[in-house]
Amino acid sequence: MDKLTKQDAEKFLSFGENNKPFLPTDYIREKVMIDYEAKKRINKNASILESLMNWICHELPYSDEHALAMQKFSRTAEEIWKSGKGNGCTEYALIFLTFARQLGFPTTLLQTVEENCLKQIKLGKVKKYVGHSFCECFIDNKWVLCDPTNRIVMENYNLDKIETNYLIHNKSTYIPYLRTTELPKMSLKEHNDSMEHECLGLN
């Protein structure tokens, strides 16, 4: 997967059908800055992103209700927000992407598969994919990795193999298979349904 450049930043502010803006920027900024002022850090922009994640997770509690689970990967950011509940990392990433862009941060959606899971699938030992959805934001003239579900900003990361110490079994490596800014021709559900083909084609 290609690295992002500074020149990519402007186009990553564009909006697709699945992540159109739906709340005034001033409203979002006011809510986020309340949290930011309460816990200022050295890096202001990274702290604002952390505060945005905190606000989203507070306002959008996780729910594993069957009805919501059946809609996974199919709801727009507006539909997710109006429901008042989130269902999985992809939905939190989509909400974060929308709000981060409205605050002026170029942001991507990055979907991945867990490396060990991918190996097991290739060996025919498992059929169920385990992955995680991240975002990337352009701040302070560089791209950083954001995990909206776990409220973490990682300033140094390997795009080809994202290593974490807080997800599955405490330490895991995730292989990106989709980075997108907008989904005008294919929905998130269609992307997810094609995940097997995409993942099995990875080296």
Image (tube, grey):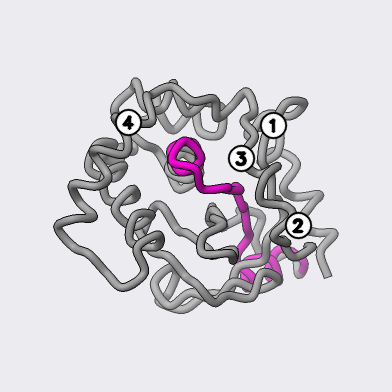
Q: Earlier in the sequence, mark 2 or mark 3?
A: 3
At numbered mark 2, what does the secondary structure look like: helix, strand or loop? helix
Q: Is residue 109 magenta?
A: yes
Q: Residues within 10 Å of mark 4 (few under 14, many from 20)?
A: few
- Residue at the image position 65 percent from the left and 44 percent from the top: 12
Q: What segment is highlighted magenta in the picture?
A: 97-122
Instruction: List the residue tagged with mark 3.
Output: 13
> Against 7, is 87 above or below?
above
Q: Earlier in the sequence, mark 2 or mark 4?
A: 4
Instruction: List the residue tagged with mark 4.
Output: 26
Q: Which amino acid type is marked by label 2? A: Cys
Distance from disc 4 to disc 3, alpha carbons, whole Å, reads 17 Å
Distance from disc 2 to disc 4, alpha carbons, whole Å, reads 40 Å
Q: Which amino acid type is marked by label 4? A: Asp
Q: Earlier in the sequence, mark 1 or mark 3?
A: 3
Instruction: List the residue tagged with mark 1.
Output: 183
Say whether residue 44 is left or right of residue 18: left
Instruction: List the residue tagged with mark 2.
Output: 199
